Image: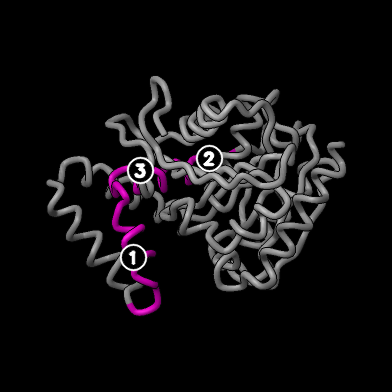
Amino acid sequence: MELPGRGTTFVRRLAGPPNAPTVLLLHGWTASADLNWFTCYRPLAQHYRVVALDHRGHGRGIRSKAPFRLEDCADDAVAVCDVLGLDKVIPIGYSMGGPVAQLVWQRHPERVSGLVFCATASHFLTSREERLGFIGLAGLAVLARRTPAQARQWLTEQFYLQRRSETWEPWAIQEASLHDWRMVLEAGRAIGKFNSRDWIGNVNVPTSVLITMRDRVVPLRRQVRLFEAIESAEAFRIDGDHDAVVANADRFVPTLLRAIASVVERAT
């Protein structure tokens, strides 16, 4: 899909029932729309119109020489809605998609009828170890800007795809190989800088928070703090790690459906 003045991205659409609410699926870091949400598409489409896009640098998302910004991802998502003629949507953000969904509400509140956050937080960096990790990502992002494309592809194969080739299906490996790793690394740096604690409490639309109880990427305490910061938010717990949307789909998908249904009921 061509987004006027922004670039070309990939958008997955499922029609859903007539006049059903639209859910806008926002994927996590180093994923794509399909890698993140493929277990959810068919169940969601039984109840809702579904729109999912690849974020900048991820999968078949927009390519840009400009530094990666989460704000641009939020504006891209709204631009997709403009092209599709969608007035209001329910953004559903997973991991990095959580900050993108938060920014969609902050920057375009008139387009949001509700919010669903999954395995995410209002901030991602507090400890010394985390700061050092994100400083490393920033350095790698700078290096990737100056490294020939062939070398970047070699790094991708060595440090990312090779580790997953034994457990991932071929389509998933192919999907991940499409990333622009300079932009993905810059996305990691942007996540480290993100902090919505000063304004997330102002969210005034029905909100559900899916908390992955055994998450080793986004600590449980931060997910809980996001839930506690939003007045009248409803919590839904998943007995799973950060990849619960895939690894524990049998539990995650029904819980996601309940979380969305709660938002729709409260919104109407």
Residue pictured at 51% horizontal, 57% vertical: 36
Q: Is residue 138 magenta?
A: no
Give coordinates of residue 13: x percent, y percent: 54, 44
Query: In the image shown, does 161 or 139 lie closer to the viewer?
Result: 161
Left or right placement of residue 267 versus residue 197 in this view: right
Query: In the image shown, does 89 or 185 lie closer to the viewer?
Result: 89
Determine crowd level at label 3: few under 14, some 14-19, many 20+ residues with C-alpha closer than 10 A: many
Res 98 visible? no
Give coordinates of residue 108: x percent, y percent: 63, 25
Instruction: Name the residue carrying label 1.
Output: 173
Instruction: Name the residue carrying label 3.
Output: 57
Q: Magenta span covers which residues? A: 166-195
For the N terminus, the image quarter is top left
What is the three-letter code of the residue carrying label 3? Gly
Please identify, in this view, whether the residue under mark 2 or under mark 3 is nearer the observer. 3
The local secondary structure at tag 2 comes to: loop
The local secondary structure at tag 1 comes to: helix
Residue pictured at 70% horizontal, 60% vertical: 211
Residue pictured at 35% horizontal, 43% vertical: 57
Instruction: Name the residue carrying label 2.
Output: 194
Q: Residues at badges 1 and 3 in contact (C-beta under 8 Å)?
A: no
Please identify, in this view, whether the residue under mark 1 or under mark 3 is nearer the observer. 1
Give coordinates of residue 154: x percent, y percent: 17, 60
- In space, the residues marked 2 and 3 are separated at their CA atoms by 18 Å
Q: In which quarter of the view is residue 115 placed? A: top right
Q: Residues at badges 2 and 3 in contact (C-beta under 8 Å)?
A: no
Give coordinates of residue 181: x percent, y percent: 29, 49
Labels 2 and 3: the sequence-earlier one: 3
